[in-house]
Amino acid sequence: MHNIFLFLRRYSTFISFLVLQVIALVMLFRYNKNQRAFFLGKANEITGYFNSKYNNAEDFFHLQNENKRVHQLNDSLRNLLLSNFTTPDISVGVFSDTTNFDSSGKVRRYFSRTAQVVGNSVSEEKNYIQLNRGSKYGISDNMAVVNSDGSAVGVVVNVSENFSQVMSLLHIQSKVNAMVKRSRNNGRIEWDGKNPLVLTLKDIPKSDAVAVGDSVLTGLYSYNFPPGLLIGTVEEIINEKQSNFFILKIKTATNFQNLQQVFVIENLQRKEQVELDKATHKKIEEINKVKK
Amino acid sequence: MINFFKNIIRFVLFLGVQVYVLNNVPPLHHFISPVIYYLFLLWLPFSTDKFWLLIIGFLLGLSFDYFLMTPGLHAAGCVLIMYLRPALINLFVQYEKNEFTYREPSAAAMGWAPFLTYVFILTIVYHGYISFLEWLQFGNFLDFLFKIISSSIISMLLVITLEVIFSRKQKLRSTMS
């Protein structure tokens, strides 16, 4: 017994070193596996506070760019106004009732909220963005985040009361459904952790006619993103001989370095979609079991 | 006591500069990340207890991690260099000449060559360990080597600049206390 105490005293520094290392490493690897909440909570509130203070000062320098973007978005929205369209002559055109709603009523699928970016990074391999809206304002996980000019930014992965954390497209674990605008073929957007101006689009078949400069939009099958938001334009086409798919390098439409005002978009039917998907898998499994 | 508060202010300053200035500099290259905050640890007084060195290192690393969303990564690196620090100090401080005449490691206290070697070794170890941990999760070997070298060079340049600008003209210990 005496010897044990002697040993402990003698190597106390080494032991405390080991203990601290293990704590740090456990945090590191556990967090990465499910990149989820346990680390955040209160910490998010604290860093969020400092980040928003810093952001107040920094915003000033980006005002002009931001104004331009807001102006552009306003412009595109103005173009959608009903008053811009003339109604076709009823006697010639298709007859339509006074409303465009069908009898069951129109269903709203996406709902957007505004938020401000208070923390941001582009230099890591796993980049996160912090927003000044949290669960109090109705933000929850898996909502899509879109820049003020309507280009895709990322997906909410964690929320605290007043802040939320967004996994940016510049994150090596990020996977977003996307399509080439010209052919409507779907693939997935990833990032290789290198250049913050370049994303990678995979799974576009070689039969597809893709050209440099083609627009890439968010896909039709994404649960999070509304379809048709600009992600970027094709910059380089890599023709890999081993596979039947192109690897496309995409120049991002969003400038991730100076994000400021963003929209957080909620898919109101997401839950139903995910549940249906799960239920289907379950059902098929059960059928297979019965067959066996 | 003055020393204690001085170090707390330093802690906040180093962290602030790292998070809000250096991390916001547009990257020269995606592998080069200028890191300076760990100089706070290298500047801690000679007299700090070994156990507290580890704890302070852990806390500093963890607070940096909170801002970067990489829990544990930098904390692990800081704890490692804090564990190695006392041994290196023993190696490079010439005790017979100026034992306890200076409070903390600096170019003035140790001489430029020993001080830079001390910083250089810990910088390489720090970047090596952190890049290694990142490499375990992602990336290839060449990137890993390149990252260590480039980040260490940039950090060393920053350390030398800081050391020249803030030469920390310390009063001798005997006149202070």
Image (tube, coloured by chain):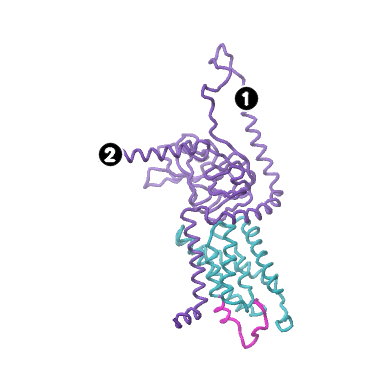
Chain colours: A purple, B cyan
Q: Amino acid at mark 2?
A: Val
The region drawn magenta spans B85-107
The subunit carrying tag 2 is: A
Please give the chain letter of the residue carrying mark 1.
A
Q: Position of residue A28 (x, y in %)?
A: 50, 60
Crowding at label 2, few (<14), some or many (≥20) Cα neighbours within 10 Å? few
User: Does residue B105 belong to the magenta stretch?
Assistant: yes
Magenta region includes residue B155: no
Residue named by callout 2: A290
- Closest to the camera, between mark 1 and mark 2, is 2
Quadrant where the C terminus of chain B is found in the figure: bottom right
Identify the element where label 1 is drawn.
helix
Query: Does B65 sit above or below residue B160?
Result: above
Single out the residue that lies furthest toward the right.
Answer: B175
Task: Tell me if mark 1 has few (under 14), some (14-19) or many (20+) residues whose alpha carbon lies within 10 angstroms of its own.
Answer: few
Q: Secondary structure at mark 2?
A: helix
**Observer-nearest of B11 and A121:** B11
Relative height, residue B39 to residue A238 (above, below): below
Of the 4 image quadrants, the one containing the N terminus of chain B is bottom right
Gap in Å between the C-alphas at discs 1 and 2? Answer: 55 Å
Residue at the farthest front position: A1
Most extreme residue toward the bottom is B96
Does A66 sit above or below residue A107? below
Q: Amino acid at mark 1?
A: Leu
- Report the residue marked by disc 1: A82
Residue positioned 57% across, 50% down in the render: A165
Picture quadrant where residue A140 is located: top right
